[in-house]
């Protein structure tokens, strides 16, 4: 509502995708921040209740009228009342109206990750919409889209400006980040049953640079992604969450887990087969006999006993030709990882500590929680979704990891961090819930209520908070890059990002320790202009405004 504090929009789904929700549960929720940790549900009054199984979402001013509009991806297998599409709501004084079709957001796709940016520097905010799965054809990916904003109307620029994006895989998260420091923000895309992809932005033209970035060979079940300068060397690194090392999935480079989609029974129906490799390289079925023959009854006839099925390889059950004729993907790593930038957009990876691998990781927050000058990590964990024969993947409690400023992280045990989240945690964002400048955490929980953890450790040393005020149409200066030096003379960098996390967007500000007399800051604005500033080292909010047209480029 433009009153200076952050309101919350929380996406939602229902227990039954074939039926619309009844009563309170199942609808998206918009909460107005009234201050003093008080929030009012204004969903109905604002006009954003009637959505369809929403996932990724963001606020952004798409029409340059000075207030923030709202967009959310939606969909689930093209089922019943659910629309596999993206909804765009225009904000008119706090009342929202669905303008999706009028604004050109018309694709019928099951989307997930969202990220906005003026990628072509024409003065308005464009959109990346990450496609997930083709309805009823998992794991076949829906095409992702690059939507170019033309004075408030979006045009599909995927083919002309980013042809590789259509094949980005089953996208779960995406973030714009300038990995090669050329002033043009690139796009990093996480996907399920695939690699993390990098699309380098060359003056508004996106091309697939995944192989050059050293990311091609690592395929996994990637979930959340977040960027920051993790080793304090002045370039942007990132962290990506994965399914972890405490599930039934234990792939390796020479023993990948594989998934196949095909008509194995010859009845015109698509079925899924999952396999893994033993140490002899044999391809074995992952699912149990009972599970497999419920979907494909011929298996029970061909392998009548449990012993028969247990002795058979996947090639015995389905035949090598049938497997070869299918749509096929593989994953060779399950670990959540850190990716360190060499300064040129090439990354070296290492696994997060063992406690981060105890359960699937999803939402991720990179912030300096303890104000020691180094970026820390919080990861939301657990999955209650696996089918009944497998059981829950619930070995995590959420995890805070202390950053050492060199790309290494040490787990902070729950009795020290205070973070105990045994629920099916999914999204996580950094917020300041009580307006005391400390970095708190908001966590979205599947089949549960959102959880807020206040950061009480930092209340004794309030940070220096830097906020950027961009030009009309991009008041939050999304895409800006700020670097600073302090008494240590080390040069550090941060970005005002869109996207990242897991189906979520965070507040866009930078918090520095209030322990220096001043910070010498340099800002590269979204349009490429540069400005220099000296920020006092005293605790408080410091706003830097975009320069006029005569600023140095």
Image (cartoon, rainbow, N blue to C red):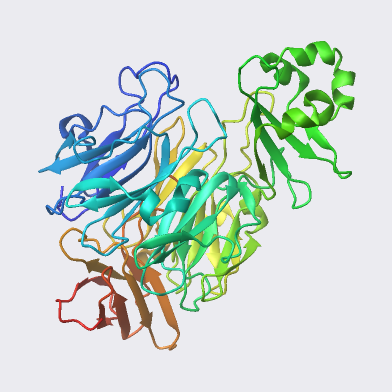
Q: Position of residue 94 (x, y in %)?
A: 13, 41
Depth check, front residue: 406 or 105:
105
- Can residue 10 be seen in this snapshot? no
- Residue depicted at 57% across the width and 36% down the height: 383
Quadrant of image for the C terminus: bottom left
- Can residue 409 be seen in this snapshot? yes
Q: Position of residue 112 (x, y in %)?
A: 42, 40
- Residue depicted at 37% across the width and 78% down the height: 483
Q: Quadrant of residue 391?
A: top right
Q: Position of residue 314 (x, y in %)?
A: 80, 30
Relative to residue 324, is residue 466 depicted above or below?
A: below
Tell me if 311 is positioned left or right of 201 in this view. right
Q: Quadrant of residue 444?
A: top left
Q: Quadrant of residue 528?
A: bottom left
Depth check, front residue: 147 or 496:
147
Instruction: Identify the residue at the far left of this view.
Output: 93
């Amino acid at each position: 509502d433009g009153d200076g504090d952050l309101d919350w929009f929380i996406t939602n789904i229902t227990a039954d995708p074939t039926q619309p929700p009844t009563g309170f549960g199942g609808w998206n929720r918009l909460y107005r921040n009234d201050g003093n940790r008080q929030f009012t549900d204004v969903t109905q009054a604002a006009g954003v209740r009637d959505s369809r199984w929403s996932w990724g979402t963001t606020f952004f001013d798409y029409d340059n009228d000075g207030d923030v509009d709202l967009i959310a991806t939606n969909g689930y297998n093209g089922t019943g009342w659910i629309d596999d599409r993206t909804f765009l709501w225009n904000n008119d004084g706090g009342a929202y109206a669905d303008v999706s079709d009028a604004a050109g957001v018309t694709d019928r796709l099951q989307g997930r990750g969202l990220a906005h940016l003026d990628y072509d520097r024409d003065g308005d905010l464009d959109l990346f919409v990450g496609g997930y799965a083709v309805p009823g054809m998992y794991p076949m990916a829906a095409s992702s889209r690059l939507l170019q904003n033309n004075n408030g109307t979006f045009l599909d620029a995927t083919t002309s400006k980013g042809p590789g994006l259509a094949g980005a895989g089953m996208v779960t998260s995406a973030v714009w980040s300038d990995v090669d420091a050329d002033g043009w923000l690139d796009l990093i895309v996480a996907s399920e049953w695939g690699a993390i992809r990098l699309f380098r932005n060359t003056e508004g033209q996106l091309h697939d640079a995944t192989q050059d970035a050293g990311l091609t060979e690592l395929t996994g079940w990637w979930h959340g992604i977040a960027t920051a300068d993790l080793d304090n060397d002045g370039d942007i690194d990132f962290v990506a969450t994965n399914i972890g090392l405490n599930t039934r999935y234990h792939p390796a480079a020479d023993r990948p887990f594989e998934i196949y989609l095909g008509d194995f029974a010859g009845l015109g129906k698509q079925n899924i087969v999952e396999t893994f490799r033993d140490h002899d390289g044999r391809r074995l079925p992952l699912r149990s006999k009972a599970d497999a023959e419920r979907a494909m009854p011929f298996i029970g006839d061909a392998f009548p006993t449990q012993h028969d099925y247990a002795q058979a390889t996947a090639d015995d059950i389905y035949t090598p030709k049938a497997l070869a004729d299918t749509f096929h993907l593989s994953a060779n790593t399950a670990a959540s990882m850190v990716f360190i930038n060499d300064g040129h957009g090439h990354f070296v990876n290492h696994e997060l500590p063992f406690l981060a691998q105890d359960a699937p990781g999803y939402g991720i927050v990179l912030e300096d929680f303890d104000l020691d000058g180094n970026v820390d990590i919080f990861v939301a964990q657990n999955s209650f979704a696996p089918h009944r024969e497998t059981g829950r993947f619930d070995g995590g409690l959420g995890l805070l990891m202390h950053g050492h400023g060199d790309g290494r992280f040490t787990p902070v045990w729950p009795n020290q961090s205070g973070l105990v989240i045994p629920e099916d945690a999914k999204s996580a964002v950094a917020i300041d819930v009580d307006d005391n400048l400390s970095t708190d955490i908001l966590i979205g929980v599947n089949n549960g209520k959102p959880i807020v953890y206040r950061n009480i450790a930092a209340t004794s040393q309030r940070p220096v908070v830097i906020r950027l005020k961009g030009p009309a149409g991009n008041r939050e200066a999304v895409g800006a890059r700020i670097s600073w030096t302090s008494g240590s003379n080390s040069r550090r960098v941060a970005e005002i990002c869109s996207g990242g996390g897991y189906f979520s967007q965070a507040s866009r500000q930078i918090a520095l320790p209030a322990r220096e007399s001043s910070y010498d800051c340099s800002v590269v604005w979204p349009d490429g202009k540069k400005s220099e500033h000296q920020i006092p080292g005293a605790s408080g909010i410091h706003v830097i405004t975009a320069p006029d047209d005569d600023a140095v480029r």
